[in-house]
Every structure is written in structure tokens, then in C-alpha cells.
Amino acid sequence: NAGVTQTPKFRVLKTGQSMTLLCAQDMNHEYMYWYRQDPGMGLRLIHYSVGEGTTAKGEVPDGYNVSRLKKQNFLLGLESAAPSQTSVYFCASSYNGGERLQETQYFGPGTRLLVL
Amino acid sequence: RKEVEQDPGPFNVPEGATVAFNCTYSNSASQSFFWYRQDCRKEPKLLMSVYSSGNEDGRFTAQLNRASQYISLLIRDSKLSDSATYLCVVLQTGGFKTIFGAGTRLFVKA
């Protein structure tokens, strides 16, 4: 049981390049999330998904796209990377919150992205 | 004003000390509250949920004051291994607006 995994762990991009970050979870969780974490700021939600085939915007969605073609995978894409997207990206997953809102989010180890 | 505010610290305390962190939130519709712990260059991990009646887990005690809109975390008998950043997390009505505080750094020294 690997929990939540992310690939790659680290990446350097040039401005304008594109890339996809992959998140995978083996806990059969319905909900998945992508966050970014910047110094001095809390984690900010980029996009999230409540199930296979569904996605929704979070707090800071601009410049990112996501897809959830399989329940266990949640992909985050950067179509044209900008220096402002230099950050640490965390994926998380949780059970179907429903009425049980106090569901723990389990995080992946993070992807460090540097955009030059 | 940030929706969830924490004192960034750092808090430098000796082993065995008691240390308390506070967190304030601005949206009275906030529904669920948590403390997460994040070690340097690692992912956040749930430390404990915070219940209205207050709750305790070993050396850790969490309190919620809805009237004043703040959450607290008390760590007793600090250990070197408690050194980390503690994140206050607020889940707002609707389930998907999860707001993370920027975190409070704690250093426990021998």
C-alpha cells in the first residue's frame, strides 16, 4: 500500500514549456486534490475532483488543467509554464466526505517545480 | 486579511516545555477544523481533528472557540521530534473550500 505517490519529484522547466504532473493513489479514494505551496503562504487549492471523470476549479486554477480519467489517477498539466508557477505541488486524496466532512486528506510527497 | 491566520514563529523551546499555538479564522461558516504537521521538505500529515468540546491525544490538546473564531494547539512535554511546522486547517461549508494557514514553525532544543 503505497498511499499517494507523485511523479516526478523534481523538475526544471523553461518559460513556455509544458509538463504533466502525475498523482496516483491506491486507497480507492473518491476525492483528489492538487495544491501548491509557496513560502510564507498556506497550501492553496488549484483543482479538485470528486470522482472519475469530474474536475472542478479551486482557489488558484489559472494556468493549470487537470484530468481524472481513472479513479486512482489525477493529472495536473501546465500548458505554458511561467516563473510564477515555481512552487511545490502536492496532491492529496480523501474518502467521499459527504456528510462526514471531517475526512482526512492524505498527501503525496510533493513535486518541486522550478520555472526559469 | 487572510482567511486563516497563524503566528509564523519560529517558536524556540527547550525539551520538556509546554508550547501553545493559536490560529484565527475569518469565516463564521467554517465547519471543520484540523491541525496538520509538516516536517521540512515533506508532505503535511494530519495531527488531529479539532472538536467543539476540545480533544486530547497524548501530549497534544486542541481547542475550538467558535465565538471568537480561533483554534489552539497545546503541546506538553515537548520532544525534539516535535520540531516541525504546524498547519491550521479550516474546512468551510460545502466541503471543498479547505483553507490552510501558512503554518507555525516549532524548534525544540535539547
Image (cartoon, coloured by chain):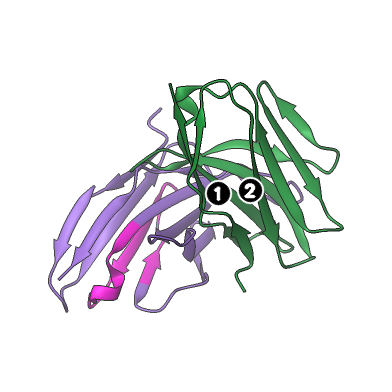
Chain colours: A purple, B green
Residue at 78%, 58% (x, y): give it.
Answer: B69
Query: In the image, is B55 to the left or to the right of A62?
Result: right
Mark seen at residue A96: 2
Kind of residue indicated by mark 1: Glu
Q: Residue at x 50, y 47 (%)?
A: A93
Callout 2 amino acid: Asn
Mark 2 surroundings: few (<14), some (14-19) or many (≥20) residues within 10 A = some
Residue A28 seen in this snapshot: no
Point out residue A98 in the picture as x, y percentages from the top left corner.
71, 52
Note whether B38 is above or below B16 in the view shown. below
- Identity of the residue drawn at 70% across and 61% down: B25
What SS does tag 1 mark?
loop
Earlier residue among tags 2 and 1: 1
Q: Secondary structure at mark 2?
A: loop
- In the image, is A14 to the left or to the right of B67? left
Does residue A82 show up magenta in the picture? Answer: yes
Q: Chain of mark 2?
A: A
A16 shown above or below B15: below
- Start and end of the magenta stretch? A65-88
Q: Which mark is residue B52?
A: none
Q: Assess whether mark 1 and mark 2 are in contact (beta carbons under 8 angstroms).
A: yes
**Numbered mark located on residue A30 in the image:** 1
Front in this rendered view, residue A99 or B88: B88
